Image: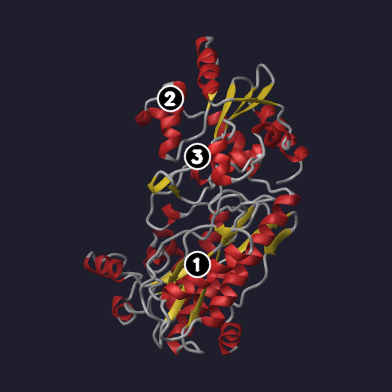
């Protein structure tokens, strides 16, 4: 937990951004995994953490702007809870740590909000992303589940996004810590992975590092020899000679800040010739994007630079042909690079994604509907204090290749005869975390080997 002053200042800034009404913050509750007492790992709502710091289940809060009240609602533990959970701080003591002096039982929250609505006062709430949040909103303010998003406070969303987008010095320290743990996870995987191991063994080893550091995973680990599947959470394959392993894994540290990195390395000690060729093109794209990071540049333009770098490399190898500027403009490169270059990161690995990409990543501008470009989570002009990922990749997806070829799509740009020879290639990417500084960027976390020589040297250890 940060200092009390940090949370008080955050709430004061927020209150100045919204003219009137009641800001409702829904904390997370314990949720049964397969029966009530066997719960999922508890993770507090990130916006609740940001403003109230209390990492406990069963809490909700309000900021009543008009009456200048800040209240945390929750029920004290009974002796039955204490028998199983041990001694816990009282809600009042938890709240005082973050500068909140007023607490009430949970049952009083509905009455407080109902009275406010009778008086015609505005109840601001953020987009619900959990089923229990939707139930709470129905019970507390009588908003029907299917229509709750119609009543989300855009004013509240924009105020939170504006504040959380700029990371403070103490937040950057936490993200840097999480990114360094993440780097340790990737380096350990590079050192241990060998033919005959299962993907699950690698995934287990990197998770152990995250937990041993006092935190958790920041998202489900991708550890796969089928890197062409962008979000591949299956870990049942055995590593074989000639394979590459793509690892996308991150740590969430004890303060719940995230790291997010990807690495790709050969199961054998060295890349094959064709693995080197494709890997180097992806790495060139990565490096070009990193070099372009600075305030005042639109991230969409950096994404398109990465796309063009991939397209030019693929043209040099005979996969593409024609004018690569035109090819990227029309989206032909997306046969090989189907996703976005990166995303914001902080308390969430995709920071504030529940608040809407249009506001977090696009500053209110509409997103593209073009295949590939529509998956870009961040497009807005970069500013000092932003934390983001860079993660271009190259992926040979057999089903996508077959579909585009049958449709004769972009035949003026794509040499399908050449592409057919690589349908079994898989995919590769590297990913790093960066802070945008006043004059450029700074890598967060320890560096992970990326160049072919560096990766092969690590694999030899």
Label 1 secondary element:
strand
**Residue occupied by mark 2:** 139
**Residue occupied by mark 3:** 29
Question: Residue 96 lies in what quarter of the image?
Answer: top right
The label on residue 248 is 1
Side of 412 relative to 243 (left or right): left
Location of residue 84 in the rendering, given as x and y in whole percent from the top left corner: 54, 45
Mark 3 crowdedness (10 Å alpha carbons): few <14, some 14-19, many ≥20: some
Write the residue at 30% across / 75% down. 416
Q: Nearer the viewer, residue 96 or 449?
A: 96
Q: CA distance from mark 1 to mark 3?
A: 29 Å
Q: CA distance from mark 2 to mark 3?
A: 15 Å
Write the residue at 39% across / 49% down. 369
Q: CA distance from mark 1 to mark 2?
A: 39 Å
**Upstream in the sequence, badge 2 or badge 3?**
3
Label 2 secondary element:
helix
Q: Nearer the viewer, residue 236 or 353?
A: 236
Question: Residue 241 lies in what quarter of the image?
Answer: bottom left
Location of residue 162 in the rendering, given as x and y in whole percent from the top left corner: 63, 39
Q: Is residue 11 visible?
A: yes
- Above or below residue 143? Residue 49 is below
Q: Are marks 1 and 2 in contact (CB under 8 Å)?
A: no
**Upstream in the sequence, badge 1 or badge 2?**
2
**Upstream in the sequence, badge 1 or badge 3?**
3
Question: Residue 396 lies in what quarter of the image?
Answer: bottom left
Location of residue 202 in the rendering, given as x and y in whole percent from the top left corner: 48, 74
The label on residue 355 is none
Mark 2 crowdedness (10 Å alpha carbons): few <14, some 14-19, many ≥20: few
Q: Nearer the viewer, mark 1 or mark 3?
A: 3
Mark 1 crowdedness (10 Å alpha carbons): few <14, some 14-19, many ≥20: many
Location of residue 99 in the rendering, given as x and y in whole percent from the top left corner: 74, 33
């Amino acid at each position: 937990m940060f200092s009390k002053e940090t949370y008080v200042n955050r709430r004061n800034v927020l209150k100045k951004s919204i003219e009137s009404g009641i800001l409702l913050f829904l904390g997370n509750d314990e949720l049964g995994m397969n029966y009530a007492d066997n719960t999922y790992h508890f993770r507090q709502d990130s916006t609740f953490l940001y403003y109230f710091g209390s990492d406990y289940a069963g809490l909700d809060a309000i900021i009543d702007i008009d009456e200048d009240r800040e209240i945390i609602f929750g029920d004290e533990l009974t002796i039955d809870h204490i028998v199983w959970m041990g001694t816990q701080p009282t809600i009042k003591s938890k709240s005082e740590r973050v500068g909140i002096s007023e607490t009430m039982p949970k049952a009083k929250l509905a009455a407080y909000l109902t009275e406010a609505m009778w008086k015609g006062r505005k109840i601001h709430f953020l987009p619900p992303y959990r089923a229990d949040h939707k139930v709470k909103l129905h019970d507390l303010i009588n908003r029907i589940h299917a229509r709750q998003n119609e009543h989300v406070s855009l004013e509240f969303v924009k105020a939170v996004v504006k504040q959380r987008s700029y990371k403070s010095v103490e937040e950057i320290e936490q993200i840097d810590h999480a990114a360094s743990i993440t780097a340790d996870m990737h380096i350990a995987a590079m050192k241990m992975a060998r033919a005959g191991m299962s993907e699950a063994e690698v995934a287990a080893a990197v998770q152990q590092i995250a937990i041993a550091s006092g935190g958790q995973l920041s998202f489900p680990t991708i550890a796969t020899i089928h890197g062409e599947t962008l979000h591949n959470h299956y870990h049942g394959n055995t590593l074989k000679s000639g394979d590459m392993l793509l690892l996308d894994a991150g740590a969430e540290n004890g303060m719940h800040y995230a790291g997010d990195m990807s690495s790709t390395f050969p199961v054998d000690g060295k890349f094959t010739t064709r693995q080197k060729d494709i890997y180097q093109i992806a790495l060139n794209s990565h490096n070009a994007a990193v070099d372009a990071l600075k305030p005042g540049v639109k991230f969409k333009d950096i994404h398109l630079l990465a796309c063009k770098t991939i397209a030019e490399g693929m043209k040099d190898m005979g996969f593409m042909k024609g004018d690569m500027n035109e090819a990227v403009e029309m989206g032909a490169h997306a046969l090989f690079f189907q996703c976005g270059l990166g995303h914001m990161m902080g308390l969430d690995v995709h920071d504030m994604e529940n608040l809407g990409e249009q506001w977090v990543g696009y500053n209110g501008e509409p997103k593209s509907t073009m295949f590939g470009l529509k998956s870009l989570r961040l497009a807005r002009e970069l500013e000092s204090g932003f934390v983001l990922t860079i993660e271009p990749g190259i992926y040979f997806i057999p089903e996508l290749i077959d579909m585009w070829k049958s449709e004769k799509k972009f035949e003026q740009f794509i040499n399908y005869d050449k592409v057919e020879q690589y349908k079994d290639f898989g995919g590769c990417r590297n990913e790093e975390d960066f802070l945008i500084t006043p004059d450029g960027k700074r890598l967060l976390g320890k560096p992970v080997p990326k160049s072919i020589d560096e990766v092969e040297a690590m694999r030899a250890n």
